Image (spheres, rainbow, N blue to C red):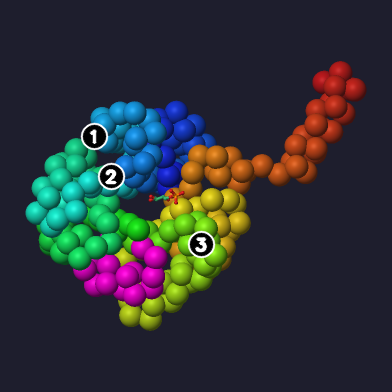
């Protein structure tokens, strides 16, 4: 499973990239707002750090606006993936982007049928939001499982990008059910690598080495 970092914070992206585990980056308007810079400024910086798919989300909600905004942001770098909301105008734009060779990430997916439509429109990635479904007492992971199965049944080329990941278990389960990608916040990336037995074991090794004067 590919690992993307779900962040617009350059320090976070650099930190995770330095461990060699960032295959790509996803951003959204809320993440961009958190860093207090414009989307395009942030995207220009991210492409210098990560050589992989970088999702930049459009703000427009009509097809013409999405196309204009998406083409402009895609022109920044060949790795840009235009992130488009899962609405009718969005899917119309996705179809055109696909014909033009522009990659897309269809976002705000909350049902398997929405995911089918995005695949038929030619989306490069579909982003089902696990955590937000869990937040309303749903089973976010079941949605990932359903979409993976449906895409396999019909050979859709769209990749399943598990989004709205909130904790390490989401990552493990997404990998088990066959998501192609998980986009993970920086904090969760660090949670993934921590294990108390690793820390205890390291402390013991260092203490034993010190006793021997190593
Ligand atoms: C990523 O593409 C999504 O925008 C993001 O994972 C949403 O996460 P949230 O539900 O934690 O805001």
Which of marks 3 and 2 precedes in the sequence?
A: 2
Q: Secondary structure at mark 1?
A: helix
Q: Which callout, 1 or 3, points to the residue nearer the camera?
A: 3
Asked if residue 114 lies left or right of residue 147, the reply is left
Q: Secondary structure at mark 3?
A: loop
Q: Are marks 2 and 3 in contact (CB under 8 Å)?
A: no
Q: Secondary structure at mark 2?
A: strand
Q: Label 3 CB, ligand 1: below 8 Å?
A: no
Residue 20 on image: x %, y %: 48, 39
Q: Is residue 56 magenta?
A: no
Above or below: residue 22 compared with residue 113: above
Q: Main secondary structure of the magenta part?
A: helix
Q: Residue 56's mark?
A: 2
- Mark nearest the camera among 2 and 3 is 3
Q: Residues within 10 Å of mark 1 (few under 14, many from 20)?
A: some
The part of the image, by quadrant, that contains residue 80 is: top left
Relative to the observer, which residue lies in front, 115 or 46? 115
Looking at the image, is 70 positioned above or below residue 17?
A: below
Which residue was labeled with disc 1?
40
Does residue 112 belong to the magenta stretch? Answer: yes
**Mark 2 or mark 1, which is nearer the start of the sequence?**
1
Q: Residue furthest front?
A: 136
Q: Position of residue 202 (x, y in %)?
A: 77, 34
Residues rendered magenta in the picture: 109-124
Mark 2 Cα within 10 Å, few/some/many (few <14, many 20+)?
Answer: many
Q: Picture coordinates of residue 19 (x, y %)?
A: 52, 37
Residue for badge 3 = 136
């Amino acid at each position: 499973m590919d690992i993307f970092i779900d962040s617009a914070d350059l320090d976070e992206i650099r930190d995770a990239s330095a461990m060699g585990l960032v295959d790509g980056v996803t951003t959204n308007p809320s993440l961009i707002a958190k860093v207090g810079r414009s989307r395009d400024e942030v995207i220009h910086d991210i492409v210098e750090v990560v050589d992989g798919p970088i999702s930049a989300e459009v703000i427009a909600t009509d097809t013409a606006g999405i196309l204009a905004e998406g083409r402009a942001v895609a022109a920044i770098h060949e790795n840009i993936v235009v992130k488009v909301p899962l609405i009718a105008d969005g899917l119309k734009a996705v179809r055109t982007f696909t014909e033009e060779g522009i990659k897309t990430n269809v976002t705000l997916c909350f049902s398997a049928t929405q995911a089918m439509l995005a695949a038929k429109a030619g989306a490069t990635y579909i982003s089902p939001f696990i955590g937000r479904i869990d937040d309303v007492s749903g089973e976010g992971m079941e949605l990932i499982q359903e979409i993976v199965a449906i895409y396999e049944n019909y050979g859709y080329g769209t990749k399943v990008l598990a989004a709205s990941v909130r904790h390490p278990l989401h990552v493990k389960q997404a990998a088990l059910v066959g998501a192609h990608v998980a986009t993970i916040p920086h904090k969760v990336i660090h949670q993934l690598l921590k294990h108390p037995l690793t820390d205890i074991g390291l402390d013991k090794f260092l203490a034993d080495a010190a006793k021997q004067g190593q």
